[in-house]
């Protein structure tokens, strides 16, 4: 894959900020392990936003000789496989290195929130090209006094995004072989019509307008990853066997099909709804570039089962670029030296590709409805 560059800075890798996430989870170790991988530096100029002492502790844990360099401004960051620039975000009176790994702690939740806020403000000011987030814990976030349920909602509010969604994206593998999704071998994206809500509420939230909006988001979101070629999008059914003509539910008839028809009339290459038990097998074999799922687990289970370590979250509808690892804080292995940085590498690479595409077309483009 060609090294992503920006049109405004030809030959310059974009600056991508890695937020540390919950310090009681695997985020710091994932950064420490991933930093030594040349792939990370081939696509971006990474820097960390978080607590440098936590990062030093994670490096020592895995036996890395990389050095943490505290920087006040992201422009001063000069990363290499041996040097980790870190923009420090501290909590007065709190020693984050003393927080026990693998346990929910409100202090860690509050710190994760502050790391993210700093990154958002830098991105909105144009001082970093993108944000790639490491995982936080929703319970710790709540205990830390944050009312938002997760990264996506914090990003949307602080950046003023009106319509947003999450896309779970699975890159092609290193050889470019199927099955991995995408007709052109570019990967498979899954956009969710509803996200962090109960299944009961998710069904109640579905409307023709909301589903159509997510179809349009999927179309726009995949274009940076298909080199601008219109993607082929499939919509998932909500009910078993796509409702069997109303026998098992009528949402396909009254909500999903009208949304598909509207999007097709607007020029989007979309079909469906398809029964979910066969749809993802086809999509992962290369029949589609993106799938619009009706609720969180409908899309997540399929992609994470197939490619857990390569999956990436992309937030759509923001004025800034944000990707994330697709795994959680993994409290069960935190502090044990077992974390895998593959999703971090993929998330950083995806962010760099989106930046390069946006700048080569129009730096003001926002992937939204």
Image (cartoon, rainbow, N blue to C red):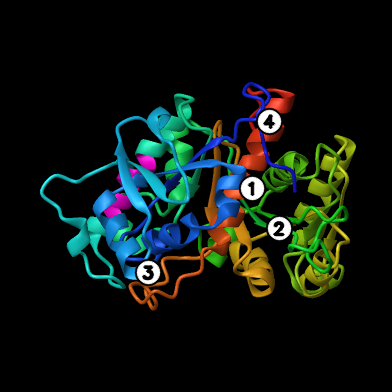
Q: Nearer the viewer, mark 3 or mark 4?
A: 3
Structural distance between the alpha carbons of marks 2 and 4: 19 Å
Residue at (61% x, 69% y) in the render = 308
The quarter holding residue 299 reads bottom right
Q: For this rendering, which residue is in front, 241 or 291?
A: 291
Structural distance between the alpha carbons of marks 4 and 1: 12 Å
| Residue beneath disc 3 | 62
Chain part drawn in magenta: 109-117
- Residue 192 lies, with reference to residue 63, above or below; the image says above
Instruction: Verify whether residue 113 appears in magenta.
Output: yes
For marks 1 and 2, the one nearer the N-term is 2
For marks 4 and 1, the one nearer the N-term is 1
Q: For this rendering, which residue is in front, 256 or 307?
A: 307
In the picture, the disc for residue 358 is: 4
Left or right: where does residue 303 sit relative to residue 87? right
Q: For this rendering, which residue is in front, 341 or 135?
A: 341
User: How would you classify the magenta stretch by its main secondary structure?
Assistant: helix
Q: Secondary structure at mark 2?
A: loop
**Can you give x and y, in whole percent of width and height, for residue 346 in the image?**
61, 55
For marks 2 and 3, the one nearer the N-term is 3
- Residue 36 lies, with reference to residue 118, above or below; the image says below
Structural distance between the alpha carbons of marks 3 and 1: 26 Å
Marks 3 and 4: CB-CB under 8 Å? no
Q: Can residue 367 be seen from the camera position used here? A: no
| Residue beneath disc 1 | 350
**Can you give x and y, in whole percent of width and height, for residue 116 in the image?**
38, 44
Q: Secondary structure at mark 1?
A: helix
**Can you give x and y, in whole percent of width and height, for residue 326 in the image?**
55, 61
Marks 1 and 2: CB-CB under 8 Å? yes
Residue at (17% x, 63% y) in the render = 98
| Residue beneath disc 2 | 171
């Amino acid at each position: 894959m060609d090294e992503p560059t920006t049109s405004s800075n030809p030959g310059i890798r974009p600056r991508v900020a890695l937020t540390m996430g919950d310090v009681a989870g695997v985020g710091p170790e994932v950064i420490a392990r991933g930093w030594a991988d040349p792939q990370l530096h081939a696509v971006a100029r990474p820097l960390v936003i978080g607590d440098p002492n936590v990062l030093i502790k994670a490096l020592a844990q895995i036996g890395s000789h990389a050095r943490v360099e505290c920087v006040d401004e992201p422009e001063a960051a000069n990363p290499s496989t041996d040097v980790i620039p870190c923009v420090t975000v501290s909590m007065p009176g709190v020693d984050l290195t003393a927080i026990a790994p693998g346990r929910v702690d409100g202090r860690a939740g509050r710190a994760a929130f502050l790391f993210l806020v700093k990154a958002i403000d830098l991105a909105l000011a144009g001082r970093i090209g993108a944000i790639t987030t490491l995982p936080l814990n929703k319970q710790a976030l709540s205990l830390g006094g944050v009312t938002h349920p997760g990264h996506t909602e914090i990003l949307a509010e602080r950046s003023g995004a009106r319509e947003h969604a999450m896309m779970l994206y699975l890159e092609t593998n290193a050889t470019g072989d199927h099955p991995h999704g995408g007709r052109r071998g570019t990967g498979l994206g899954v956009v969710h019509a509803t996200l962090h809500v109960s299944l009961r509420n998710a069904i109640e939230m579905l409307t023709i307008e909301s589903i159509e909006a997510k179809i349009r988001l999927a179309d726009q979101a995949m274009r940076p990853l298909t080199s601008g070629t219109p993607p082929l999008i499939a919509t998932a059914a909500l009910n078993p066997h796509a409702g069997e003509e109303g026998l098992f539910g009528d949402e396909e008839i009254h909500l999903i099909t009208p949304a598909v028809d509207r999007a097709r009339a607007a020029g989007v290459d979309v079909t469906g709804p398809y029964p979910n038990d066969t749809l993802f097998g086809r999509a992962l074999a290369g029949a589609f570039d993106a799938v619009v799922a009706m609720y969180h687990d409908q899309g997540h289970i399929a992609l994470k089962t197939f490619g857990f370590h390569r999956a990436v979250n992309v937030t759509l509808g923001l004025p800034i670029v944000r990707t994330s690892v697709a795994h959680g804080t993994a409290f069960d292995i935190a502090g044990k030296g077992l974390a895998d940085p593959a999703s971090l590498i993929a998330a950083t690479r995806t962010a760099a590709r989106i930046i390069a595409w946006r700048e080569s077309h129009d730096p003001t483009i926002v992937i939204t409805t």
